[in-house]
Amino acid sequence: MAGSNCALAVEVFEKPKKYEGRIARKNGSRKLYLDFFYHSVRVEKSTGLDDTPANRRKAEKLLEILLEQKKMGTLEFAKVFPGASDEEKEFHTRLEGGEYAPDARGVTFGSYVQRWYDAVWQNFPSHTKREDYRSVIDYWLVPYFGTKSFFHITGVEMQKFLASLKHRGGAKDGQPLSRNRMLNVLQVFKTIWHDAMEEHRWNLPDPCRLLKRHLPKKKKKVVEVFRFAEWSAIIEAMEPHYRPVAKLMVLTGMIASEIAALKKSHIREGYLYVEQSIVRGEESDELKTMYRERRIPLTKAIAEILEDAASKASGEYLFTMQNGMTFTAERFQRRVWVKALKQAGVKYRKPYTTRHTFAAWALAIRTDQNRLVNLMGHASKQMIYEVYGRYVEGLEQDRLRILSYFGRDFKKGR
């Protein structure tokens, strides 16, 4: 029987003295409808039968059975009316003492996401995470999966989806997304998929379980660092207001989002404590990993930058944009960094290169690797050995200038 939630404008064929239920017909329709009350709610559902004497008898018999089941407490609404809305089926099943889970064939990804936004997404504590998820969902997931039911989202369908993940516009128009971007998109999909499985107690095969073989091959990570002459040229070309920030990045291995969150209270007992970050204007107590929360000894070079910043700061933050707005990594890169490298005639590299440069320079002046692990906030020496170690030999000729830049007290450590 097909479900219907429409109000009835009816012609009554049977009306018992004590109203329990009736067979009715809508104006303009030839179909017969069941009309009865269940759990104090009026239920009006089509039988799917045309209005003929024979079908009317069938409908009356069906109504009689339903009313008897209702009386005995054995009526299972969701089974009798599979075409009813999920809200109706959940409501009646709960009052029947059961638990209702909609069929995965009847729930589309798009319809679930709309409810998921209200129930889950809006409760993410991080504004940045919410916006990142929404961007992926609205740009990649819903356009592809929106009308597909969860039952029909299979491993084969996911392979087709991966093949569709290509740049739309720009210099890379039509080229596949990078492996990392694909993984980010899949992570959002997996979050929604597993929430749906949990909420509705479905036991569908994970469509992502065999996708790794279909992802682009992982590219070998190539890490670049600045030579000392390049860095000097960049600092010289940079707007004076932002030079202390750039210098601090190379002197500490801190990234711009960590420096953006530095407060006067983070300088204490001879150390600079790295405890927070600001990403897209939002302060967070969570850094990239648990190891990134660290303390950096105040060398003379670092202390001079921080003391000068503290004396000029009008608020709690040590660094701001030149117009007084909150310092953010995004604005720094877009408005300051790009311009400085161009004017310096230095090949463009992201601001994150300063972190790689700090590590490579520290190795070039023979800094203890265990100490460097702590200064950078790594979990182990693996990253130091595998990524940064290869650059030590190329920087040997800059060693004395690097040592002077860091200061000999950097080598002493604590």
Image: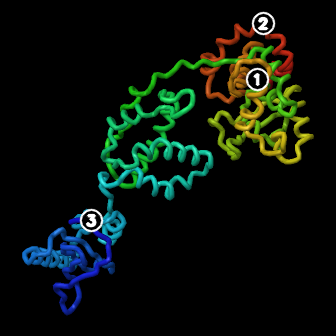
Q: CA distance from mark 3 to mark 2?
A: 78 Å
Q: Which residue is mark 3?
A: 78
Say if 29 sits above or below 378 in the image.
below
Residue 160 x %, y %: 36, 34
Q: Considering the numbered disc 3 on the image, is that residue within a helix, a strand or a loop?
A: helix
Within 10 Å of disc 1 (Cα), the crowding (few <14, some 14-19, many 20+) is many
- Name the amino acid, label 3: Ala
Q: Considering the numbered disc 1 on the image, is that residue within a helix, a strand or a loop?
A: helix
What's the residue at 79%, 10% (across, down)?
398
| Label 2 vs 1, first from the N-terminus | 1
Foreground residue among 210 and 287: 210
Colour pattern of the rendering: rainbow
Query: Which is closer to the viewer, label 2 or label 1?
Result: 1
What's the residue at 32%, 62% (across, down)?
100
Residue 318 x %, y %: 83, 40
| Label 3 vs 2, first from the N-terminus | 3
Say if 72 sits above or below 292 in the image.
below
Residue 322 x %, y %: 84, 39
Q: Considering the numbered disc 2 on the image, is that residue within a helix, a strand or a loop?
A: helix
Does residue 98 appear in this view? yes
Q: Which residue is mark 2?
A: 397
Say if 33 sits above or below 384 in the image.
below
- Name the amino acid, label 2: Gln
Residue 298 x %, y %: 84, 30
Q: Which residue is mark 1?
A: 341
Within 10 Å of disc 2 (Cα), the crowding (few <14, some 14-19, many 20+) is few
Say if 118 sits above or below 370 in the image.
below
